[in-house]
Amino acid sequence: MNTSLDLPGLLVHQNNASASRIVSMVVPSVMFAAGVLGNSLALVVLFSSRKEQKHSVFYRLVGALAITDLFGTCATSPIILVVYANGLKWQGGRPLCNYASFMMIFAGLATIFILASMAMDRYLALNKPYFYSAHVSPARVKFLFPVLLSAALLMACLPLIGVGDNVHHFPGTWCFFDYYGTSLRVKFFAYLYSVLGLSALTVIVILNFVVLRTVLSLHRKACEIQMVVFLIGIMTVVSVCWAPLMLRVFLIQTGLKERDDILDLIFIRMASFNQILDPWVYILFRKTLLSRLIQFIKVHLCLQRKQLDTRGQNARDFGEISRMKKDSMNDHIHDSGPREPFFSESVEDTLSQ
């Protein structure tokens, strides 16, 4: 049986210039290579870390994040590359479409759930230390992973059992759930996915800002500052990458946005970038690099402060000199009050003679 699937309706946009620029095999190829390389390096760096750091709750979550991102990249990107190599003809029919959509939903939500857990871990560690020390441990975190993965797995399975539907999207190289359909089951899943995703992103942002405020208000250890800086970087990446797609899905259901295949492709690529950027954020925010960055900032601030102090001292010296000159002039005016003429007596003596 021929399982190839040509999608002329989805390829109609290739005739215009903007579509031809964005529909290119170069972008997914670079994304795939960067995702595999970055997540592999992140895992190597994690496993080579110090023992006490490697077995901490936070860094176990970081390891789970890197594994999930690597799995998601390897499970979805090769399909897209094969379709591009096949002249934008889908091979595998409906079963492969369901698989690709399942993996995209599962990997994306699993990543967001793990990031929410990391934000909660830092919030409890810094704001509820007694509760954290009593109830949170690496052994208990092992039970958290199956819960998070099960939640993402359940969401990804819903379109397979009729709650929602998996369809091809422009330019026919990727499958995702249908968020343009009008049936109740399709709209229900689209609402559920977008609301759940946006809620998780909101929790991540709120918890990270609370943690950041706590760190700034108290003197914390360098390792804690490093974790928070890493979390802020990850929060920025996940928000920029995922929020546009989830917000667009939600607005489409409400009728506030219309169909735009080019924009859909841009947003799904932005979401895919999250799995690529996450490990690079961790690698770049390693303690050694972060220490150098902090040292550079301190030196720069010290130089600025020194320049300001020098300018202030010069201003004070100038003010003191001006004041002294003013006082000297006042004294001179005071000493040169009304006097008798200097030659008055000698002139009178001369006249009397």
Image (spheres, rainbow, N blue to C red):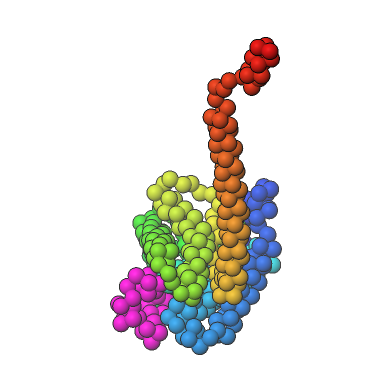
Could you tell me if residue 139 is visible in this image? yes
Q: Main secondary structure of the magenta part?
A: helix
Identity of the residue drawn at 53% across and 29% down: 334
The stretch drawn in magenta includes residue 256? no
Q: Quadrant of residue 47?
A: bottom right
Report which quarter residue 134 is drawn in.
bottom left
For image coordinates 58% across by 81% down, the residue present is: 45
Rendering coords of residue 138 (x, y %): 40, 84
Q: Residue at x 30, y 77 (%)?
A: 131
> Which residue occupies the foreground of this view, 208 or 99?
208
Q: Position of residue 202 (x, y in %)?
A: 40, 60
Q: Position of residue 39 (x, y in %)?
A: 58, 75
Whether residue 208 can be seen here = no
Residue at figure coordinates x 47%, y 53% from the top left? 248
Q: Is residue 298 above or below residue 130?
A: above
On screen, residue 229 above or below 70 = above
Q: Quadrant of the C terminus?
A: top right
The image position of residue 98, as x and y in percent, is 50, 69
Nearer the observer, 214 or 327: 327
The quadrant holding residue 170 is bottom right
* 138 drawn magenta: yes
Tell me the quadrant of the picture where the N terminus can be found: bottom right
**On screen, residue 11 above or below 338:** below
Point out the stretch of residues depicted in magenta. Answer: 121-149
In the foreground, 305 or 208: 305
- Extreme residue toward the front, this view: 353
